[in-house]
Amino acid sequence: MTAEERRASVLVAATVEFARGGLDGTSTEAIARSAGISQPYLFRLFPTKKALFLAAVRQGFARVREQFEQAVAVPGGELTGEEALEAMGDAYLRLLEDRVFLLVQLQAYAACDDEEVRATTRRGFRDLWYTVERFSGVPPEAVRDFMAQGMLLNVVAAMDLSEVRERWARACSTWTDAGGGTSGVSTKRARRPLGS
């Protein structure tokens, strides 16, 4: 493997480990073992554990932006307005089926007491906001509502509320979409063990 391929491989292993333990609860020893490399070689690829965590956070935000860009692309142009929001929302629901993706995102928010993590997470969220705004063309209030619904979806998926048969859980897990139909987040596929 080239150094760049090895970095990518280590980032995959680290992302799984960070999903489990977050920044503070994950050891570089566990990451190195999971990646099949020595701990000294890990530090040749990434200077610190925090640098590796920040790379995982940035990769997560980039993945959302890429999925949003793909979601609005249609033959002959791009979706806009409510159609763009709906397509990006559907793309985000698919991303939430990846439990590792979800948990790393939540770990990033949980680690925001660290200044570097907070700055990186803010930039990622800002770039996501601008992506939604640019593709949809909707006013800031609609972007805010879209982003707020995404945060609620994170919580719904993290707690696997689709499995809870109580009124409050159903209300959080299901809503009416722009076309009058119902949508919801199903976490059935998201429940596979980390790293599988």
Image (cartoon, grey):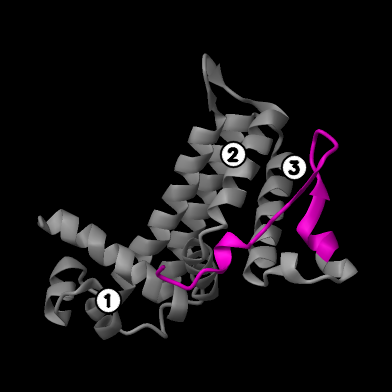
Q: Are marks 3 and 1 in contact (CB under 8 Å)?
A: no
Tell me where residue 115 appears, x and y as whole percent.
44, 71
Drawn side of residue 175 relative to residue 126, left or right? right
Residue type at mark 3: give it.
Glu
Locate the N terminus by quadrant: bottom left
Range drawn in magenta: 170-196
Image quarter of residue 49: bottom left
Distance, label 3 to label 1, CA atoms, is 43 Å
Pick the residue in front: 13 or 78. 13
Q: Provide the secondary structure element on which disc 2 rests.
A: helix
Q: Are marks 2 and 3 in contact (CB under 8 Å)?
A: no
Give the number of callouts.
3
Q: Which residue is mark 2?
A: 132
Tell me where residue 23 appears, x and y as whole percent.
41, 78
Comparing labels 3 and 1, the label whose residue is closer to the camera: 1
Pick the residue in front: 93 or 134. 93
Q: Which residue is mark 1?
A: 34
Residue drawn where x is 44% and y is 49% of the image:
63
Q: Which residue is mark 3?
A: 141
Question: Pointer 1: residues within 10 angstroms few (<14), some, or many (20+)?
Answer: some
